[in-house]
């Protein structure tokens, strides 16, 4: 006896919840816009480096790759903490979720501290936005990203109280999802920015 093909395909039940993007749709539009903006800046950096290889080689040699690597670990770790926060909220473990979110906030703050020291070191060395095209683009790219990390930390700080109070659940955590989506974008941008600006010659 043959089995109907329709039974083999196992169609989704009408009771199954529809798949959706996590967070608000507005956040995803914003993420797309920011990725496009950074994409243009990455192209500008790459094109200008082709025109001025000596200037860019000297500028990149002056950057501290170890600090950039530590910042990469901080952002990736913060993303992991944010993901754990969301998983704990969906499982109803709000106390654990609070710890993970606080850890994400502290890791993001660590990035801001290290990056601020990097800017101060350049300032004390007499390097600024107008030194040459490399530093102009370096300040633009890293400074714009720095502002996004600051915004992400503010979002985490605003989410901390409702997470602590247990106001989110598996059925209602849209704001938390949106905050995590934003942070993952910030992390992704740095994963591209760090090798492009600090490592590739």
Image (spheres, rainbow, N blue to C red):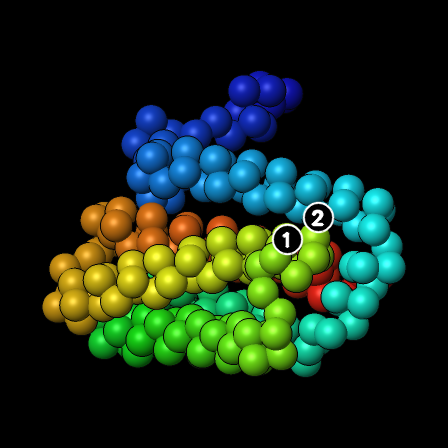
**Camera-nearest residue between 138 and 23:** 138
Which percent across, then down, holds residue 23?
33, 44
- Residue 192 seen from this side: no
Within the image, what quadrant is residue 122 found in? bottom right
- Quarter holding the N terminus is top right
- Pinpoint residue 194: horizontal percent, then vertical percent: 66, 63
Numbered circles on residues, count: 2
Asked if one can make out residue 142 in the rendered structure from this viewpoint, the answer is yes
State the residue at coordinates (48%, 35%). 33
Alpha carbon distance from label 2 to label 1: 6 Å
**Mark 1 neighbour class, 10 Å CA radius: few under 14, some 14 to 19, many 20 or more:** some
- Identified at 33% across, 26% down, the residue is 14
Q: Earlier in the sequence, mark 2 or mark 1?
A: 2
In the picture, measured across the screen, residue 26 lies left or right of residue 10, that is left
Q: Which residue is mark 1?
A: 137
Q: Which residue is mark 2?
A: 45
Answer left or right for 167 relative to 112: left
The quadrant holding residue 97 is bottom left
Give the crowd class for mark 2: few <14, some 14-19, many >=20 residues within 10 Å. Answer: many
Residue 61 percent across, percent down from the top left: 78, 72
């Amino acid at each position: 006896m043959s089995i109907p093909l329709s039974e083999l395909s196992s169609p989704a039940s009408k009771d199954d919840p529809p798949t959706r993007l996590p967070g608000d749709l507005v956040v995803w539009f914003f993420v797309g816009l920011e990725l496009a903006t950074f994409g243009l800046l990455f192209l500008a950096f790459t094109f200008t480096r082709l025109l001025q290889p000596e200037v860019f080689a000297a500028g990149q040699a002056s950057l501290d790759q170890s600090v950039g690597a530590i910042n990469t670990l901080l952002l990736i770790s913060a993303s992991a903490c944010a993901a754990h926060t969301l998983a704990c909220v969906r499982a109803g473990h709000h106390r654990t979720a609070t710890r993970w979110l606080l850890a994400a906030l502290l890791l993001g703050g660590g990035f801001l501290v290290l990056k601020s020291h990097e800017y101060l070191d350049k300032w004390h060395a007499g390097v600024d936005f107008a030194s040459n095209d490399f530093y102009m683009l370096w300040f633009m790219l890293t400074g714009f990203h720095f502002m996004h990390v600051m915004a992400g930390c503010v979002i985490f700080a605003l989410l901390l109280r409702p997470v602590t109070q247990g106001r989110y659940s598996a059925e209602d955590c849209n704001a938390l999802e949106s905050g995590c989506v934003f942070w993952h974008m910030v992390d992704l941008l740095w994963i591209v920015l760090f090798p492009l600006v600090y490592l590739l010659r």
